[in-house]
Amino acid sequence: MTPRRIGWLVAAAFTAALHVAPALAQCPDGTPPPCGGAAPPARRPNPALDERTWIVLPFENVTRLADIDWLKDASVNLLYLDMSKWRDIKVIDDERVADLIREVPEARGGQLTLQSGIAVARRAGAGRLVMGDLLKVGSRTQVVGKVFDVRSGQRLRTVRQEALSADSIMAAFGLLARGVLDVDPPAGTTSGAIGTNSVGAYKAYIAGVGFLNRWILDSAHLGFARALELDSAFALAHYKLSLVYGWESPNSGEGGRHADAALRLGNSLPTRERSLVAGNAAFKNRRNAEACAIFERMIRADSADVEAWYNLGECRYHDNAVLPLPGDSTLFRFRSSWNAMLTAFRKTLELDPTYHLAFQHIQDALLARNRPGCVLAPNDTECAASGNFTFQAAVGRAGDSLVTLPVNLASRQGPESYQQQLAGFLRVGARRLNLEAARHAAQEWLAAGPAESRPRIAYARILLKLGRIAEADSLLRQVPRSPSSRTETGNLAVDRIEIELKLGRLSAATRLADSLGFATDSISGARNLGILIRSVFGHTEALMALVDANIQGPPWAKPYFRAQVRAFVGLPADSVVEAEQAVVAGLGSMPGAPRAAGVLAATLTWVDPATRGGRWPASDTASSDPRLAMMSALATKDSMRIQRALARFDSIAASLTEEADNGLALAGAYGHLAVNDTLGALIHLRRFQAVTWLKTPILEQISSGFTFSGMLWPRTFLLLADLEAASGNRPAAVRAYQSFVGMWQSGDPEVQPMVRRAREAITRLSP
């Protein structure tokens, strides 16, 4: 139920609401923030030249005619595909060629010369270089290929082919490939390996590839879709469109459909492309082990295949199958190691620092709080077949490695074991270490692509989690263009709203939240994001409707979660105790108090004990969740036990100032108020305001149910304001009341009495 993880769509209309002018802020050296960032990655030495490795560079449009300009980039793809049919040579793929041209200083911008072409070839370790010219006179197009020995710089031969019309251009390149290599085609092959005879389809495909390489997903989608309109049997267009769906709409079945079509239609493709298509089809159909095996074979055949390394990282990241440890069926491990996944992505970047897709899942893994898992049924090989996602691992750290130890939450001790695991990682600062590792990775990404939106957004998102709000704000204001993915547009909207709130620009935050809500209201699958974010701003009616639409199960489930949501956001919930009691009764034969307390943790923890009338339907003082253990101690009414629990809670909270709040402040304040300790409550709330709030994501789920961190913020500021006012600290009280009013002032009618009370307090306390 975490919005950033499930790919909710956001209306394209909202993009306009996110447009911001470039910031004026800059570092002392005149560069944009972040200041003091990482230096660009060290340039690796060129590999040894291999005479069996070939590279084709874009042909030059000598006659400068616009109608053949598309052939400049297409020439690389056409020759690569035809030349790749020979098994005893290696041809650098066209996407890698584009990356190399950007990477090699001599080749950036302008026309490629022989000198710059040789520099690119040396960077790739290619012993043979093909450059060429395109000349059009009337309806005839002459294609001239020039073959060079890279070591000596000498031209080995010149080959010419002539296309009498636009429809024969691709065939001309097929014949040119034979002349370039000066050999006959391999046995059993024919010229023209691109998989289409439609020039229009191929031109649309090449345009789509160009957009995909620059991560302009909407335009790439249109290009590949247009190619398939013109030739529905074009395997490579199906393959590339499946990749676009994987990033645009990861939960859509369209990605798998196009991957299957590419596999079915791609028999004539070169060996490498057939392997990529087969691996992608397995991956899109959630056969991760099969996909990984295909990409591992590709790497054994060519250890410098960037795309194979990247895809190996992908299937390792998404493989969540859990296996029992040999010799002990009660202990488990993930079949796929996230450390091996990180190795694959880092190898991708070592080979090609411009392959920026590899940075994304490095970020995802380092920023994750947990990793889900499923145990495989006897005849299953993948999670998709069993659907039994009952395992979860907190993401920890040991040295330079991630630690993910799966726990079965469906077992008797599972929830407690997971909480102990999570608490242990928090104590040693694993979350902070992973955030810092993610920040360093983002710095490398930003250094490799300073003009791109994605690394800038990723870096800003980490700065947000670290509480460096002004830096994140400055960085996002320099995003050169709005994201092309509607999902990423929505995530960016949430970032902007969080920044505006934390910088005290409450009216701007409210406007952005309203825009997000209105833009997503009529979009299937997108409304939830707008509803959740607007609930932070006092719009609770739609949130209740969301609960009604999503909660299914026993008769006690929906009443409890309705009461939970109301109580969690800070509205009166008179029936919450009765709803809790119904849950305990409904659990029946399930394991006793600890299990019941775990199910009810959200209300046991964040309902003010003073409103309970001494009624606690369940408690668990031994819980490893310090919030629940402290509140459960209050239920015992044992003063000594309560004092010990509060002291333990205070110690834990004080040690977690580098972490997100996770509701600790509000729970701690209620605990101290239950023993009439206003100062103890203020210590927790003041720490929240000054430190931990700044590091808390607005939509991070902090307990079971509809419990996202930002929903607690208004009521936390209101309680802080009331206590500051009672303590005589008028300026602090006014500031806290203003924060509360700023968030809920435009909320639903039900919240307005609380807003009026806060406004009256501001008037009363102001000089």
Image (spheres, rainbow, N blue to C red):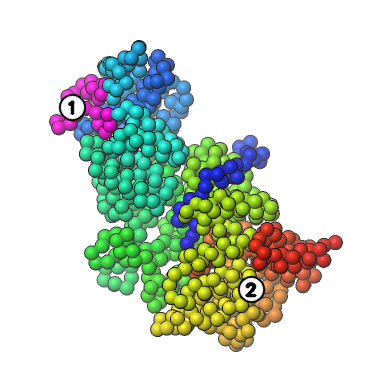
Between disc 2 and disc 1, whose residue precedes?
1
In three-dimensional space, the C-alpha distance between marks 2 and 1, rounded to whole angstroms, equals 79 Å
Q: Residue 605 appears in which quarter of the rendering?
A: bottom right
At 73% from the left and 60% from the top, the residue drawn is: 738
Percent of width and height locating residue 147: 29, 20
* The one of 70 and 642 positioned closer to us in this rendering: 70
Q: Is residue 637 above or below residue 730?
A: below
Q: Residue furthest bottom?
A: 638
Q: Residue at x 56, y 41 (%)?
A: 479
Seen at 63% across and 39% down, the residue is: 21
Estimate the x, y position of residue 534 in percent, counting from the top left.
59, 58
For the record, the magenta segment spans 171-197
In this view, which residue lies farthest toward the front? 522
Q: Residue 249: horizontal and vertical position, in percent?
A: 42, 49
The amino acid type of the residue labelled 2 equals: Pro
Answer with left or right where residue 639 lies relative to residue 376: right
Could you say which disc has been placed on residue 632 in the image?
Answer: none
Q: Pointer 2: residues within 10 angstroms few (<14), some, or many (20+)?
A: some
Q: Which residue is mark 1?
A: 185
Viewed as shown, does residue 743 lie left or right of 341? right
On the rendered structure, is 562 left or right of 232? right
Is residue 190 within the magenta segment? yes
- Kindly tell me whether residue 594 is visible in this rendering: no
Query: Which secondary structure lies at badge 1?
Result: loop
Extreme residue in the left direction: 187
For the residue marked with disc 1, what is the amino acid?
Answer: Pro
